[in-house]
Image: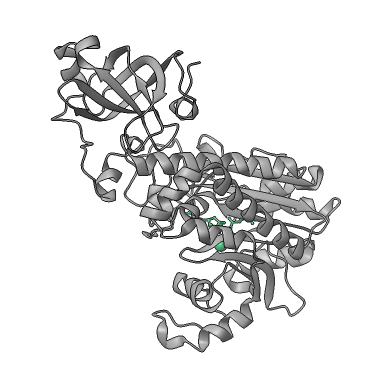
Amino acid sequence: MNERISALLKREPSQEVVQAEGWVRTKRDSKTVCFLEVNDGSCLKGLQVVIDKEQFANDALLDSLSTGSSVICKGPIVESSGGSQRVEMASLDVKLIGDCPTDSYPLQKKRHTIEYLREIAHLRPRTNMFGAVTRVRNTLSYAVHQYFQENGFVYVNTPIISSSDAEGAGQQFLVTTLDPKNPPLTKDGNVDYSKDFFGKKSFLTVSGQLEGEAYAMAMKNIYTFGPTFRAENSNTKRHLSEFWMVEPEMAFCNNDGNMEIAESFLKYLFKAVLENCEEDMAFFSKFVEKGMEETLRSIVDTPFVRLPYTEAVKELEKHASKFSFPVSWGSDLQSEHEKFLTEVVFKSPVIVTDYPKDIKAFYMKLNDDGKTVRGMDVLVPRLGEIIGGSEREANIDILTSRMLEMNLNPEEYWWYLDLRRFGSVPHAGFGLGFERAVQYVTGMGNIRDVIPFPRAPRLADF
Ligand code: 4AD
Ligand code: MG
């Protein structure tokens, strides 16, 4: 394999002839010399390739080298006399691999708006910003696996198609092969899903948690990392219809242990990008969210605030006039409330615990007060909720009555209830919205810009 441009840029000048492969970002000409900036996605900066016109190139070749074209360049890496780079390639040979017509290429040299780039999602990774997002996302993915592998968690792949509603919130996409115009019907006129592909009503999963719990009841500590789907009609800057979720699940663990792991996991991720994506993080700190690197560094060194929901509501009620949504005990925290707690009150990530049972999922462990559940959400400045999790209800009777209270049919969750029948233990887990993590560390304003091809209401292009 030939060296990537990131590696070539770290070389000391020498006479050794090396090869660079990539796409031309810019071309500048002087009378005798042509400068190409060639980028291959391995780092923010491109390699400056200097072509001596008289010696090495003909006019036809020089004309055909334009922004967007793909090239293979050969030559030694030498000290650069120019200002902004340490080394450059003194080209001995340039081959045009694929040309790129200047007049129809949608990426021009000028700065494009982020909305325009969203319309050309197949080309946007060729820009500085989306290249940087892609590398940071990659580093975070790797760090997710590193963290859990280093701490003895087993990676489990849970199904994408499932007949259970893991959140019990009815936000699922139906998976069917029935003819929508002429579906088979039951005697009472409903669609007969027993004739469908899976023999029952099936959906894209909203979370791998329930199946993850089954594996935690055997492997002790597991994690899943995969795509999840929500058919909620939320057109916001922090919601996607298809997003990736990281879900650890720990047996013999209560909610305190859960919070400890969530905090150390997030800090591990933040450190990973600070250490491995220095150049890209400097870019985000400068152009996207001022001082983001500094903010992350201080977060890594400071304990997160922990705050029971009841206390959070008391604090918010003092400032009720500042919000457009009312806040009182029993109501769910809105994004504006989450932001207020993290940005104004504590200026730090906050873990809110012990929410009212009626606003949380059926599986959360009921507290002794009978009113609240042992849930925890990690909130961060700018975004609000980044992690949601809980200790799970391990008592089969309480769990069954919670399902009934929430209009879920315990029979459909027979296997989940079995986990409480056979060797049940206290256990807990959480879900990190992976795109929210990418969004947070990069400072990107819209979640649609931190996943390659976003899916949202009325948006499934590419
Ligand atoms: O809070 P949620 O719904 O929790 C669960 O799904 C649990 N089963 C997790 C668990 O305990 N194993 O989702 C978890 C996280 C949220 O905190 C948020 O970061 C992210 O997933 N999330 C979304 N991200 C993007 N778009 C959406 N529509 C999201 N919905 C949730
Ligand atoms: Mg949640």
- Quarter-of-image position of residue 267: bottom right
Describe residue 164's horizontal placement relative to residue 36 as left or right: right
- Total labels drawn: 0
Where does residue 392 sit, x and y in percent of width and height?
72, 60
Where does residue 318 sit, x and y in percent of width and height?
51, 89
Where does residue 5 sit, x and y in percent of width and height?
43, 26
> Is there any visible trace of residue 90 in the rendered image?
yes
Where does residue 47 sit, x and y in percent of width and height?
37, 28
Above or below — where is 354 with respect to 217? below
The foreground one among 250 and 202 is 250
Q: Which quarter of the frame holds ligand 2?
A: bottom right
Describe residue 178's horizontal placement relative to residue 23 as left or right: right
- Quarter-of-image position of residue 352: bottom right
Residue at 20% x, 42% y is 110
Give the position of the C terminus as an image quadrant: top left
- Quarter-of-image position of residue 58: top left
> Is there any visible trace of residue 200 in the rendered image?
no
Above or below — where is 428 with respect to 243? below
The colour mode here is one colour
Q: Residue furthest front?
A: 81
The foreground one among 155 and 228 is 155
The foreground one among 41 and 84 is 84
Above or below — where is 383 with respect to 177? below
Q: Residue furthest right?
A: 423
Residue at 43% x, 55% y is 285
